[in-house]
Image (cartoon, helix red, strand yellow):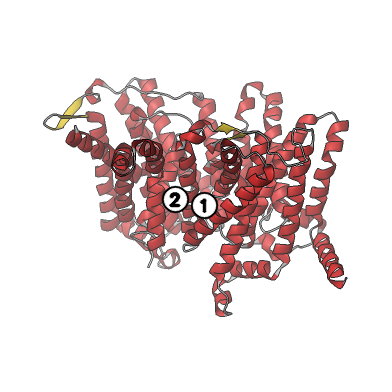
């Protein structure tokens, strides 16, 4: 059982990691470049999941739901930046926390009014609900494997975009020194709006992919928000590479910790103590990790700013 | 003799400078009379909740408003304070003073450890590391099955010697006394040399360092004091609610505390209390108002509350105390109106 189980859980951890990266990538740019504490990023995950589920239900086609959810979340991010976020750039972090906290309440309630408080479940099309053998004797759900692949593809695309294109260079310059970037004649307003909408869009993609494997319900984004905050803090705010590495670490640590930590504790202490403390320590693990990283490297593993 | 006269003079000065605060505290002392004659006993309950949350927010305001340390995890201390009641009773200790003592010691120690680790960072990183510690404690209590885990545990009101909290209004006035004492203590702290230094650190940390003081030490002391105040509020909260669960330290509560402070006015003594009054009154009345206009959506009052918060941020600079100052024409200290960075 052990190798199969470890492999399976490692894949689950990887899947959690890449979805986490999609959420965190946008957030790290929003925090790093625009210096906005955007707590409603979790709501974008929720919007993506609901858009995909609702469109899939309306059209009867899962793939159309997935495809249309992307422009929907991009548009919602674009609108949000235009209506509210751009007024927050020059405010302090407290104001941003308060305003975006208000946004969370608003979006959660909006979804609750629109779709009811109960969780939506969307069925996978038959083509995606099978299993593949990743190793002889180790079946793994096709859909989760697909999530991993799409997530990795997105990660590579984001990396290429940020490091190889002209707009990517502007983004990096903006992360390093927004004032100087603006002084060099780059329209930082448009750049910000574009980054914000793209970030929201990636969170939406994460949400729409998570839809079929988690409960789609109001407030579903908040755990993702908190975890992705942990990720970008570990990775260093503003660093896409840091976010990727940290997301994979957090995904693996969280998933593997929950499965194996109780068993590992049993080797050291007696069973009753291990059973009691195991789940407690496992759920605290990522936060302990983050605290340790911050204590030794107060600006994260890969700080973007010099 | 002269020491006593000095003390009274000091209190007098403080009260004169913080009229709004003492007006509110005084108002809470008289509120039960009003609610008795107006036949609104339910509102005593709301008033107690306002005082408790206001007290916790006042504690947080010491670090957040005066010290400029944006802690996003103070609900953890409320939770620790509340669990001090639950866990003490679990082991047969029902004395309320003992609960308070435990809570002060535990929150002080927790504040010391978390403060020591978290204060090495600053800015967004500080916000996030305090959140991380709060989440850690939240999940710790969620998974401690012995103390009820996710479901929490019901508790009895603490036994405070001759004060029987099950008598009507005893709990109310116990909470009121705590509020008054915390207000008094914070008034002294803020006006003391320590408080002035804390504010100076907020506006220019390196200058304080250049003057030969250790900013970290001042921040630590402030952090511990605010943790203890939140702990006291949490302990009394447990007695009020007669129930303790991890929900009390959910991260949204840390957000709520921040909202209450910003709503009321940063770095003012009256602000957090004022903010708590408005926040909880909105929470109580919005469902009713909404129910009157559109009965089907009474439950969904947050759809109005959320945008309301955003409006406060966008247009209500300096919170309610800022508005009061502007209306009454008395320009308070510049802290109320921190401009753009």
Q: In the rendered image, is residue B170 in sight? A: yes
The residue to which callout 1 is attached is A86
Where A284 sits versus B285, above or below? below
Query: Left of A145 or right of it: where is B253?
Result: right
Towards the viewer: A238 or A119: A119
Q: Residue at x 32, y 27 (%)?
A: A64
Q: Are marks 2 and 1 in contact (CB under 8 Å)?
A: yes
Q: Give the image quarter of residue A175.
A: bottom left
Question: From what the image shows, is residue B317 above or below residue A113?
Answer: below
Report helix, strand or loop for mark 2.
helix
Disc 1 crowd rating (10 Å Cα; few below 14, some 14-19, many 20+) is some
Of callouts 2 and 1, which one flags the residue occurring earlier in the amino acid sequence? 1
* Chain designation of label 1: A
**Left or right of A190: which side holds A8?**
left
Residue A304 picture location, percent across and down = 36, 62
> Which residue is more in the foreground, A300 or B9?
B9
Picture residue at 40% right of the left edge, 28% below the top = A215
Quarter location, residue A176 = bottom left
Percent from the top left, x then y, of residue A190?
43, 53
The circle drawn on residue A193 is: 2
Which of B122/B106 is in front? B106
The quadrant of the rendering that contains the N terminus of chain B is: bottom right
Task: State the CA–CA distance, disc 2 to disc 1.
Answer: 8 Å
Question: From what the image shows, is residue B280 above or below residue A184?
Answer: above
- Residues at marks 2 and 1 on the same chain: yes
Residue A263 x, y percent position in the rendering:
29, 38
Q: Residue furthest left?
A: A136
Task: In the rendered structure, find residue B137 and report the number of the disc placed on it.
Answer: none
Extreme residue toward the front, this view: B92
Secondary structure at numbered mark 1: helix
């Amino acid at each position: 059982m052990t190798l199969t189980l470890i492999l399976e859980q490692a894949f689950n951890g990887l899947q959690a990691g890449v979805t986490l990266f999609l959420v965190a990538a946008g957030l790290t740019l929003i925090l790093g470049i625009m210096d906005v504490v955007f707590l409603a990023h979790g709501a974008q995950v929720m919007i993506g999941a609901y858009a995909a589920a609702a469109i899939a239900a309306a059209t009867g086609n899962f793939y159309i739901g997935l495809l249309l959810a992307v422009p929907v979340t991009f548009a919602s991010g674009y609108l949000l930046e235009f209506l509210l976020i751009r007024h927050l750039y020059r405010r302090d972090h407290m104001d941003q926390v308060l305003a975006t906290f208000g946004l969370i309440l608003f979006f959660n309630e909006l979804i609750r009014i629109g779709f009811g408080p109960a969780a939506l479940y969307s069925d996978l099309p038959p083509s995606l609900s099978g299993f593949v053998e990743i190793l002889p004797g180790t079946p793994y759900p096709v859909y989760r494997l697909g999530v991993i692949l799409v997530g990795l593809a997105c990660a590579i695309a984001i990396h290429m975009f940020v490091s190889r294109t002209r707009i990517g260079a502007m983004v990096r310059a903006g992360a390093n020194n927004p004032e100087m970037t603006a002084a060099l004649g780059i329209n930082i307003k448009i750049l910000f709006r574009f980054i914000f909408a793209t970030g929201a869009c990636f969170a939406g993609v994460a949400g729409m992919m998570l839809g079929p494997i988690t409960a789609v319900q109001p407030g579903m984004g908040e755990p993702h928000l908190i975890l992705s905050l942990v990720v970008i803090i570990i990775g260093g705010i503003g660093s896409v590479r840091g976010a990727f590495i940290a997301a994979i670490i957090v995904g693996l640590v969280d998933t593997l910790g929950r499965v194996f930590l109780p068993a590992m504790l049993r080797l050291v202490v007696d069973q009753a103590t291990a059973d009691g403390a195991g789940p407690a320590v496992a759920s605290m693990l990522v936060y302990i990790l983050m605290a340790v990283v911050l204590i030794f490297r107060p600006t994260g593993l890969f700080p973007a700013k010099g | 003799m002269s020491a006593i006269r000095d003390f009274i003079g000091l209190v007098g000065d403080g009260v004169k400078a913080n009229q709004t605060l003492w007006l509110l505290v005084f108002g809470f002392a008289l509120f039960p009379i009003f609610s008795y004659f107006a036949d609104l006993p339910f509102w005593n309950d709301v008033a107690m909740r306002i005082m408790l949350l206001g007290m916790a927010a006042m504690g947080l305001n010491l670090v957040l408003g005066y010290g400029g340390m944006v802690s996003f995890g103070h609900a953890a201390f409320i939770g620790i304070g509340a669990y001090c009641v639950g866990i003490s009773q679990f082991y047969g200790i029902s004395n309320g003073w003992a609960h308070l003592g435990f809570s002060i010691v535990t929150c002080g120690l927790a504040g010391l450890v978390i403060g020591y680790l978290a204060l090495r960072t600053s800015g967004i990183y500080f916000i996030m590391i305090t959140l991380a510690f709060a989440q850690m404690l939240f999940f710790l209590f969620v998974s401690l099955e012995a103390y009820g885990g996710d479901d929490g545990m019901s508790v009895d009101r603490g036994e405070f010697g001759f004060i029987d909290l099950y008598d009507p209004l005893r709990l109310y006035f116990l909470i009121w006394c705590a509020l008054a004492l915390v207000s008094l203590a914070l008034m002294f702290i803020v006006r003391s040399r320590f408080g002035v230094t804390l504010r100076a650190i907020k506006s220019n940390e390196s200058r304080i360092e250049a003057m030969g003081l250790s900013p970290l030490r001042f921040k630590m002391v402030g952090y511990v004091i605010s943790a203890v105040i939140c702990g006291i509020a949490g302990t009394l909260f447990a007695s009020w609610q007669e129930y303790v669960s991890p929900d009390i330290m959910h991260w949204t509560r840390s957000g709520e505390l921040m909202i209450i402070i910003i709503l009321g006015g940063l770095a003012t003594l009256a602000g957090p209390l004022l903010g708590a009054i408005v926040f909880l009154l909105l929470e109580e009345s919005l469902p009713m108002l909404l129910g009157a206009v559109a009965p089907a959506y009474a439950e969904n009052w947050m759809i109005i509350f959320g945008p309301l918060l955003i409006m406060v941020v966008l247009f209500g600079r300096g919170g309610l105390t800022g508005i009061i100052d502007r209306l009454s024409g008395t320009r308070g200290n510049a802290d109320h109106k921190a401009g753009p960075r």
